[in-house]
Image: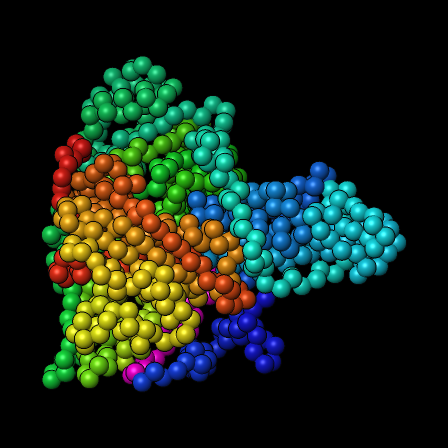
């Protein structure tokens, strides 16, 4: 695997691998020195490196997956098609396109010849089949290229044997091997010979960093045409023989239980109804059509038992979070200071494709199809729940229509398996939009308390205390950190795990003197899951608001203030880019303003500049956005642009209008018309994304990167346009709809 090398020739990643078993202090001391060495002082009070500066969550993923990272499957077929089995999930982030580009580049084959297929759950991969934490390209970049390079070497060796020539005399291009005398052999012709066990071919190292060639336009997504024409096959499009539509009547509060069904016989006699069965999550109806199943579900008269959060509403949750927020350590005394507190509401994942799965369970085997980001844990859990041996359960990973962290959990797959077993037939389970919004897992509500002290233009300390509703990590991600804590009940084993995830993802990019960031989690009984950017969206978003207020307190321009206190030239480069391209500081009429913010995570960095129009207070609208992003080595710039625009849209939504009102154990929102996600009219017509040229030899993460800076920039623009300090998000959070019945 390629990497940044020191004078001894060892890559930084190898260096970390060597040190992973060493005492923590040794790792922190050495890596901290490396991080600080190249940085200029800039006459500010320096901050020590945070844990995420030393080793981030992505690094832990890479280290955990290293033993199985080479277990990749690539096949060259007789017609020249190259098939690569991807042990990750495609949920719209463009991963299959980026991997196809790596395979094509390294194999020297046309991109059109490469087919990337999603692999089934493979327990032998251990910790190496989980999609999350902006880690897929970071983890796969080296192994995929090495796999393709080895395949290319074997194809060259096969051609050399055929022509009795030295392999070194041959070249490859456009899916073919070429001899000096002009002879060519297509890869498809050589595939069988290249697979011969006795073929002596030593896999070469991958070619130098596979960044897009200058001037070559990045390709479109390989699945774009299928998606826009409706040809793309998602879970409910699969033709599984005998699988019948299924929906579930769910309780009126989170985690409620079924006590009795009053009209079971009547519902079973309704047109098209095939089965009505009780499962732990509700009452399932299987019918000939989804329309018949939904009608029958609505007719059920169920008596429900209570859930764990029946008495909780927004006011009680906010009170709990405020009470749990640890005190700040640095007293202001005679030093000037800025204090602020922020609240963020619960947020639905709300992917376009609702939770769904197909299951075919018999007495002695089970087969499941679903969009899954943690398929190994899904397979293990389903096998245990059904009482089947692991080798009798097959889990197929299907491309999904969105996730944002939701599909780390496999609720639908487990639920479908239980229903199929109870009905003794294959089922096609769909969560309705109301189910998905009200009973799906959500981003936890958070409360933030921040204090910064300053003197004579310097920031002396920066303290941030976060209290959050507990995030459920029992989906496999936790196993990468620890083999035991992720299986303990929430409230017992979650604390250490949550702290690890928080500290390996959240960090301040500024030299703000004594800097501390800490998390406290509060159990609520509300179903939660990692949401895009996990802790960073709210935590760093709040901090970027605070940076603007610090700039105002010290009489500095927000852009210049950031530029002064950022730690590295690479950080300043993206900030400078948006300030220049966005014409920072240009005069604007009343009710309109600019905002700017910065974020760094997973070895990548970005800055965002937006312009906002708040002349209609009920319909504040971002009218322009300029984003710069540096991911070290950009594999697919077009994909990066899409990731940044997606992050911007998420930030517009959750900062301005989209959130969930919790009322006695259930969200009031039940659809897109109520959960006010940004629509086309809410998004800026003028969006420019600048992907900086390669600044490293390996790619950083991008999936989580785009949200936090955009949250900060939008809130800061709103503050400058209104003259108010934003403190509670979303900013416009009225209940302007009639909730669906429970």
Give the side of residue 1 with respect to residue 27, left or right: right
Q: Where is residue 718 shown, x and y percent of the image?
A: 19, 57
The residue drawn where x is 50% and y is 76% is 19
- For the magenta stretch, what is the residue range? 44-62
Q: Where is residue 18 shown, x and y percent of the image?
A: 54, 74
Q: Where is residue 525 shown, x and y percent of the image?
A: 23, 50
The residue drawn where x is 19% and y is 69% is 549
Q: How is the image coloured?
A: rainbow
Can I make out residue 691 in this image? yes
Indicate yes or no whether the magenta region holds residue 49: yes
Count of residue discs: 0
- Image quadrant in which the N terminus is located: bottom right
**Image vertical order of residue 671 relative to residue 631, above or below:** above
**In this view of the protein, which residue sits in the foreground, 476 or 147?**
147
Give the side of residue 333 with respect to residue 190, left or right: left
- Image quadrant in which the C terminus is located: top left
**In this view of the protein, which residue sits in the foreground, 205 or 395?**
205
| Res 729 → quadrant | bottom left
**Image vertical order of residue 264 relative to residue 327, above or below:** above
Q: Name the outermost residue toward the right.
A: 164
Q: Where is residue 197 shown, x and y percent of the image?
A: 77, 51
Indicate yes or no whether the magenta region holds residue 336: no
The residue drawn where x is 69% and y is 56% is 150
**Image vertical order of residue 366 relative to residue 156, above or below:** above
Can I make out residue 26 in this image? no
The residue drawn where x is 59% and y is 63% is 209
**Image vertical order of residue 736 relative to residue 329, above or below:** above
């Amino acid at each position: 695997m390629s990497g940044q090398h020191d004078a001894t020739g060892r890559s930084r990643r190898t260096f970390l691998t060597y040190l992973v078993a060493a005492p923590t202090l040794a790792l922190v001391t050495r890596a901290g020195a490396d991080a600080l060495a190249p940085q200029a002082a800039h006459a500010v009070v320096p901050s020590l490196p945070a844990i995420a500066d030393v080793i981030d969550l992505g690094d832990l993923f890479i280290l955990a997956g290293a033993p199985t990272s080479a277990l990749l499957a690539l096949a060259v077929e007789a017609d020249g098609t190259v098939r690569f089995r991807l042990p990750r999930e495609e949920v719209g982030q463009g991963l299959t396109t980026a991997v196809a580009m790596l395979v094509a580049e390294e194999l020297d084959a046309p991109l059109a010849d490469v087919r990337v297929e999603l692999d089934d759950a493979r327990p032998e991969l251990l910790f190496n089949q989980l999609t999350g934490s902006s880690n897929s390209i970071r983890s796969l970049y080296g192994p995929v290229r090495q796999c393709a390079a080895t395949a290319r070497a074997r194809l060259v060796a096969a051609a050399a044997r055929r022509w009795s020539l030295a392999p070194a005399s041959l070249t490859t291009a456009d899916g073919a091997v070429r001899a000096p005398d002009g002879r060519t052999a297509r890869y498809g012709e050589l595939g069988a010979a290249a697979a011969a066990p006795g073929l002596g071919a030593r896999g070469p190292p991958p070619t130098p960093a596979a960044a897009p060639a200058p001037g070559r336009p990045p390709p479109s997504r390989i699945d774009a045409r299928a998606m826009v024409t409706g040809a793309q096959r998602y879970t409910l499009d699969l033709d599984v023989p005998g699988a019948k539509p299924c929906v579930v009547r769910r309780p009126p509060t989170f985690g409620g239980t079924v006590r009795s069904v009053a009209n079971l016989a009547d519902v079973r006699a309704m047109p098209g109804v095939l089965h009505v069965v009780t499962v732990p999550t509700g009452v399932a109806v299987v019918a000939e059509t989804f329309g018949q199943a939904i009608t029958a579900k609505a007719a059920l008269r169920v008596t429900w038992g209570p859930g764990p959060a029946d008495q909780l509403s927004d006011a009680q949750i906010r009170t709990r979070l405020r009470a749990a927020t640890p005190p700040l350590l640095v007293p202001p005394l005679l030093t000037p200071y800025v204090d602020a507190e922020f609240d963020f509401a619960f947020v639905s994942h709300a992917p376009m494709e609702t939770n769904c799965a197909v299951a075919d369970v018999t007495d002695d085997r089970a087969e499941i199809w679903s969009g899954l980001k943690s398929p190994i844990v899904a397979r293990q859990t389903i096998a245990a729940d059904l009482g089947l041996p692991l080798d009798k359960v097959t889990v197929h990973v299907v491309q999904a229509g969105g996730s944002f962290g939701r599909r780390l959990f496999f609720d639908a797959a487990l639920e479908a398996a239980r229903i199929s077993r109870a009905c003794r037939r294959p089922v096609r389970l769909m969560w309705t939009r109301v189910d998905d919004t009200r009973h799906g897992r959500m981003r936890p509500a958070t409360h933030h308390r921040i204090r910064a002290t300053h003197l004579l233009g310097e920031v002396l300390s920066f303290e941030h205390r976060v209290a959050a509703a507990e995030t459920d990590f029992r989906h496999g991600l936790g196993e990468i950190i620890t083999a035991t804590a992720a299986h303990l009940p929430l409230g017992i084993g979650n604390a250490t795990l949550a702290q690890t995830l928080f500290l390996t993802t959240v960090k301040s990019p500024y030299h703000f003197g004594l800097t501390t960031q800490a998390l406290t989690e509060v159990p609520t009984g509300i179903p939660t899951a990692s949401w895009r950017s996990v802790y960073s969206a709210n935590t760093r978003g709040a901090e970027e608001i605070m940076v603007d207020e610090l700039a105002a307190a010290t009489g500095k321009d927000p852009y210049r203030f950031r530029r002064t206190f950022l730690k590295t030239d690479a950080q300043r480069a993206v900030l400078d880019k948006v300030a220049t391209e966005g014409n920072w500081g240009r005069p604007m009429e009343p009710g309109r303003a600019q905002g700017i913010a910065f974020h760094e995570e997973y070895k990548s960095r970005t800055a965002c500049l937006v312009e906002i129009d708040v002349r209609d207070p009920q319909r504040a609208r971002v009218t322009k956005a300029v984003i710069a992003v540096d991911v070290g080595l950009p594999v697919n710039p077009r994909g990066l642009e899409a990731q940044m625009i997606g992050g911007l849209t998420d930030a517009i939504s959750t900062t301005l209008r989209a959130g969930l009102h919790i009322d006695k154990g259930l969200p009031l929102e039940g659809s897109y018309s109520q959960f006010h996600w940004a629509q086309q009219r809410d998004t800026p017509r003028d969006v420019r994304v600048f992907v900086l040229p390669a600044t490293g030899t390996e790619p950083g993460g991008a999936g989580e990167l785009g949200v936090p800076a955009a949250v900060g920039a939008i809130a800061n623009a709103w503050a400058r346009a209104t003259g108010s300090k934003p403190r509670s998000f979303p900013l416009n959070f009225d209940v302007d709809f009639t909730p669906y019945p429970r």
